């Protein structure tokens, strides 16, 4: 998903009665234009799909290689991931669930001066998720052998709990070794499905509305998702494991800063009418803020430019949408240790006070006007 244009220290999202929330789902005509932009003009449909897939995969691999050496990954995101994933326990094996990336096959405009195509924000986000899966795989290799055997045994037990559900709700690749990466997009193009399966990605086939209950460590990769989607992820997993990083079943979220949500929304929403306040009863994001640790935020456009310039302009065209892809995003972990002990209004046992479930289709006030989940 693409972030709104950044201004100053953080993204300002404007709302109006005419544009309550931009829809990211492409229509059938938009899907056709995506394929046309990829220069598919041959008559043989099978050959066309192969040409598209190879072209998309080629840029995806270019993005992975460029991101792997980019300062944002090497200096900001990957150190934070390694710290967060292995900070409190030896179980560094995390599955990854991707929500909100959307259609990634569309190639951005080609630079007229250098003949290089810039990658779209969704393409960069997918490349990042694949790099994170590689990072989690490498973290497993650093675990002592005895602890690794215990981890495999525990993972086998958890696999048994979720195996039937995954088979029912997912289209799985042929190879499933190591950490799994799950991807949901309701309007995937055929070429995108082919690319994902080729990259050993599990495709979620049903709209879970973010309410995926996890049994093992899981990293939710959700750049620029609606706040309601983050809230549903938290609601589905609102238990002691969410707030205790020493237990298996831990959650990390990469997405929009919850603390910035709190700063932007609290004043307007909590000072609104009683009817507007009813949405707070189902808002897990605002309730989890006191227990949230955020890391890896890049403050503004100048800092993003410095991160690009750190590579001496290498891949600067390919990665020109880096800020749009990851602006305002942080890695978030949750623990009762993050709360302010001096505040008597904050519970030391928050899992006992689970917010109400939000039912899809209900109109909610999310701070930017009325909207629905998806």
Image: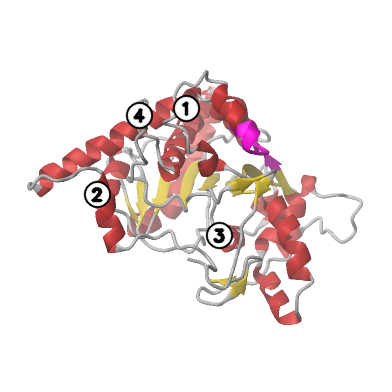
- Which residue is most to the left? 43
Q: Earlier in the sequence, mark 3 or mark 1?
A: 3
Q: Residue at x 75, y 59 (%)?
A: 350
Residue range of the region highlighted in magenta in the rendering: 294-304
Q: Which mark is residue 57?
A: none
| Nearer the camera: disc 3 or disc 2 | 2
Spatial distance from mark 1 to mark 2, Cα to Cα?
25 Å
Q: Are marks 4 and 2 in contact (CB under 8 Å)?
A: no
Mark with earlier residue (3, 2): 2
Is 311 located above or below residue 370 in the figure?
above
Q: Which residue is mark 3?
A: 226
Which residue lies under the disc numbered 1? 316
Q: Earlier in the sequence, mark 4 or mark 1?
A: 4
Q: Which of 110/290 is in front?
A: 110
User: In this view of the protein, can residue 86 be seen by the observer?
Assistant: no
Residue mark closest to the camera, 4 vs 2? 4
The first of marks 4 and 2 along the sequence is: 2
Q: SS of the residue at dot 2?
A: helix
Rendered image quadrant of residue 268 = bottom right
Give residue 85's position: percent from left, percent from top.
Answer: 60, 36
| The label number, if any, that marks residue 116 in the structure image | 4
Q: Circle 3 sits in a helix, a strand or a loop, which is it?
A: loop
């Amino acid at each position: 998903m693409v972030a709104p244009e950044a201004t100053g220290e953080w993204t300002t999202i404007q709302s109006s009665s005419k544009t309550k929330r931009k829809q990211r789902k492409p229509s059938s005509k938009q899907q056709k234009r995506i394929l046309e932009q990829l220069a598919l003009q041959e008559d043989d449909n099978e050959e066309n799909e192969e040409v598209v897939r190879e072209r998309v995969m080629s840029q995806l691999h270019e993005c992975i290689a460029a991101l792997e050496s980019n300062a944002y990954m090497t200096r900001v995101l990957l150190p934070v991931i390694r710290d967060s994933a292995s900070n409190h326990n030896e179980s560094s094996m995390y599955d990854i669930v991707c929500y909100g990336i959307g259609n990634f096959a569309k190639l951005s405009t080609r630079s007229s001066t250098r003949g290089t195509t810039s990658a779209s924000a969704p393409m960069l986000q997918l490349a990042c998720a694949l790099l994170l899966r590689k990072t989690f795989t490498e973290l497993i290799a650093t675990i002592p052998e005895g602890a690794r055997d215990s981890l495999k045994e525990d993972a086998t037990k958890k696999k048994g709990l979720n195996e039937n559900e995954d088979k029912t709700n997912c289209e799985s690749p042929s190879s499933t070794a190591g950490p799994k990466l799950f991807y949901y997009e309701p309007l995937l193009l055929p070429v995108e499905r082919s690319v994902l399966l080729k990259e050993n990605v599990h495709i979620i086939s049903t709209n879970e509305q973010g309410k995926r209950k996890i049994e093992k460590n899981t990293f939710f990769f959700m750049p620029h998702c609606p706040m309601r989607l983050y809230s549903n992820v938290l609601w589905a997993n609102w238990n002691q494991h969410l707030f205790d990083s020493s237990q298996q079943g831990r959650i990390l979220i990469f997405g929009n800063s919850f603390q910035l949500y709190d700063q932007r929304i609290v004043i307007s929403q909590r000072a609104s009418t009683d009817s507007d306040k009813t949405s707070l009863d189902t808002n897990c994001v605002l309730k989890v803020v006191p227990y949230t640790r955020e890391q890896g935020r890049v403050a503004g456009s100048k800092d993003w430019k410095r991160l690009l310039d750190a590579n001496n302009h290498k891949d600067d065209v390919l990665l020109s949408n880096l800020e749009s892809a990851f602006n305002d995003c942080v890695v978030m972990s949750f623990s009762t240790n993050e709360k302010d002990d001096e505040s008597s209004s904050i519970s030391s046992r928050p899992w006992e006070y689970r917010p109400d479930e939000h039912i899809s289709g209900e109109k909610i006030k999310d701070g930017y006007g009325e909207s629905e989940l998806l």
